[in-house]
Amino acid sequence: TLKFATRIKCLLVHPIRNICLDSEKLARKYEQEIETLKLELMMQNLLENRGLVSYDPLSEAEVTEIHQQVTSYLNGSLPDLQLMTVRETKEAFSQFKTYISSIEKSYNEEMEVLQEKIKTLESKLAQKLEQT
């Protein structure tokens, strides 16, 4: 045990203070960091002459405008979509997805109606064949 004590005596110890991470402080710190990054991105956009680009969530008016653009594009009256940000692009894809799901739903409903008509025609044909 004396050998152990002499070895331990030679160890260098550097005490450091324990840092307690408070979730509210961390959240505020991250929010400030996000705001700083947004400002830096806006400055970069201005330096590259991109104009004023908003990085806030899309408003209802912007969503409606994108919906009109997508509808015009699908109808063929608009050659290209004018999307400037990633959020606008995501919203456009969401609009496309909604449009495709509505088409799929109407297609499935129409197929069910046609299948019912086929069944009734087959049953009528079978009845006529039995009568003859």
Image (cartoon, rainbow, N blue to C red):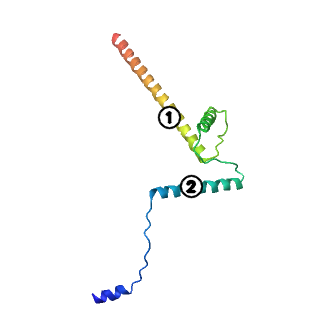
Most extreme residue toward the top is: 131
Q: How many marks?
A: 2
Q: Residue at x 43, y 20 (%)?
A: 117
Disc 1 vs disc 2: Cβ atoms closer than 8 Å?
A: no
- For disc 1, the marked residue is 101
**Where is residue 101 drawn, in percent x and y?**
50, 34
Secondary structure found at label 2 = helix
The residue that appears at 68% across and 48% down in the rendered structure is 52
- The front one of 82 and 74 is 82
Q: Amino acid at mark 1?
A: Ser
What is the quadrant of residue 22 in the picture? bottom left
Q: Which residue is mark 2?
A: 34
- Horizontal side of 92 relative to 111 (left or right) equals right
> Foreground residue, 130 or 93?
93
Badge number at residue 113: none
Which marked residue is nearer to the observer: mark 1 or mark 2?
A: 2
**Residue most extreme to the left:** 1
Tell me what residue is drawn at x 57 percent, y 41 percent: 91
Q: Residue 81, how many percent across, how many down? A: 64, 40
The picture places residue 55, in percent across and down from the top left corner, at: 61, 48
Label 2 sits on what residue type? Ile
Q: In the rendered image of this protein, does residue 68 appear above or below residue 121?
A: below
Q: Which of the 4 image quadrants contains residue 82? A: top right
Q: Give neighbour class at mark 2: few <14, some 14-19, many 20+ (Cα, 10 Å).
A: few
Mark-to-mark CA distance, 1 and 2: 35 Å
Residue count near mark 1 (Cα–Cα under 10 Å), binned few <14, some 14–19, many ≥20:
few
The quarter holding residue 70 reads top right
Quadrant assignment for the C terminus = top left
Q: Is residue 21 left or right of residue 38?
A: left
